[in-house]
Amino acid sequence: MIKDVWESIRRENLTLEKLAKTIDHSLVGPLVTDEQVREGCEIGKRYLTNSVFVKPYHVPLAVKLLRGTGVKVGTVVGFPHGCSTPQTKAFEARQAVEMGAEELDVVSNFAATLAGDYDLLREDIGAVVEASKGVIVKIILENCYLTREQKIKVCQIAEEMGADFVKTSTGFGTGGASVEDVRLMRETVSPKVGVKAAGGIRSLEKALEILEAGANRIGATATIKILESFKEYSGK
Amino acid sequence: MIKKIDIETLTQEKLAKTIDHSLLSPLITDSDLKQGCELADKYHTATVCVKPYHVKFACQLLANSEVKVSAVIGFPHGGHLSKIKALEAEQAILDGAKELDMVLNIGALKSKSFDFVRDDIKGVVDVAKRYGQILVKVILENCYLTDEEKVIACRLSEEAGADYVKTSTGFAPGGATVHDVELMYETVGPRLGVKAAGGVRSIEVALNMIKAGATRIGATRTEKIIKEWVGLKKQKQDEKFILPGER
């Protein structure tokens, strides 16, 4: 395992800084308190992660704490069931952007996908992308509920509607990110669309595996653990 | 005033009118919704409780039924902006919802930001009042709370003008318990109603909840519960029939 990790680090030409910039440090659980947002923002600042992801009502607090640090604030839209109306999602997205969020992880209406209602899915994703001009929009598929064909279809629609990333999972479904899904999503979308993997990435080994499968971004709560084990491996 | 229901005088009709038939799973499709609305209409439940984007469709399906449509707001984590909850509530009302089951801001409650929690609820209550005759139920998500936090959440809901407090979303690690329903009823009943949801899958559990003070039950196994009630009633009659002194 240690040898694999080493090879993987070398192959990806990874540094601690680069790895940290693939991470969205996630604080979106329903129980996360103000205090935990403060602690989480400190972690983001210490390691210079790409962003800190918070619940919508925590955006103003996180923006204040991370101003001038180079660490972005991200938030979720329609989280975690994705069943708000397109109008509500668009409004939620616009509000988040106005408060200073620079990345939005939007849960697609996966019940619409399950029902084969792709017109609604297009409207759902399109409304949010339209309302979020100037920031990065990631569309969460919630793969654990979808068939292979459905995953492909949502990726295609997300790209067609102008999303910047497709993302595997909310972390609150019955399953998280898998190597197979990341590969499939990477193959489906064009190179200008990113792939974010989230849900169950709790170790450096898993993170490297996922990055090698083609993910550009990782959503993690175990950020310290992942980055500290990188330090150990790379002898920094 | 939402008084306790007397189990002794409970009938199938009354029981059905305590039930919000829940169609909230993120996996519920349009055809599941259709079936669910037909079932609710068949048994005359109080409402069908649906996801926001399904409100319009459910209202169309139940246009000629007495069964109302209830929408969830800020579901299931409650971490949305207050503004968004209010907007989502208004949209649901305009789409035809007559009841709103909103999730309070659990993180804010845990942070002891009680004014925030109250204002968050009040934002939805204000919208409901503006349209009149719209019930607001506040979901506490008890499994994450201490008893003290549950009591505070009940009081904040009352202060904000809500009509009901509700135990759970049904999407967290724990659901309704007799202890919690009793605690909630002691705290705000009968001024506010108590809705028990999450894990109420049999008539035994449903009756225990009602005895503890629940006047509304959130259930997915509505048909099973009502059929079990009918079975219980029949059993009781049969028992009576064979009682020696009664022949």
Image (tube, rainbow, N blue to C red):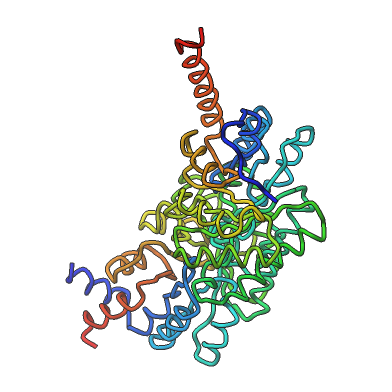
Q: Nearer the viewer, residue A111 or B14?
A: B14
In this rendering, position of residue A2 left or right of residue B142: left
Regarding residue A121, the answer to whether it shows in the image is no
Specify the farthest residue to the front. B245
Percent across and percent down for residue B83 are 70, 69
Specify the farthest residue to the top. B247
Q: Nearer the viewer, residue A105 or B104?
A: B104
Q: Nearer the viewer, residue B202 or B64?
A: B202
Write the residue at 58% across / 74% down. Answer: B114
Q: Nearer the viewer, residue B117 or B9?
A: B9
Q: How many marks?
A: 0
Specify the farthest residue to the bottom. A68
Percent across and percent down for residue A73 are 54, 79
Reply above or below: B145 against B22: below
Specify the farthest residue to the right. B131
Regarding residue A137, the answer to whether it shows in the image is yes
Write the residue at 65% across / 63% down. Answer: B158
In this rendering, position of residue A178 left or right of residue A159: left
Write the residue at 48% across / 54% down. Answer: B180
Percent across and percent down for residue B102 are 63, 58
In this rendering, position of residue B206 left or right of residue B2: left
Reply above or below: A157 against B240: below
Q: Quadrant of residue A10?
A: bottom left
Percent across and percent down for residue B139 are 58, 57
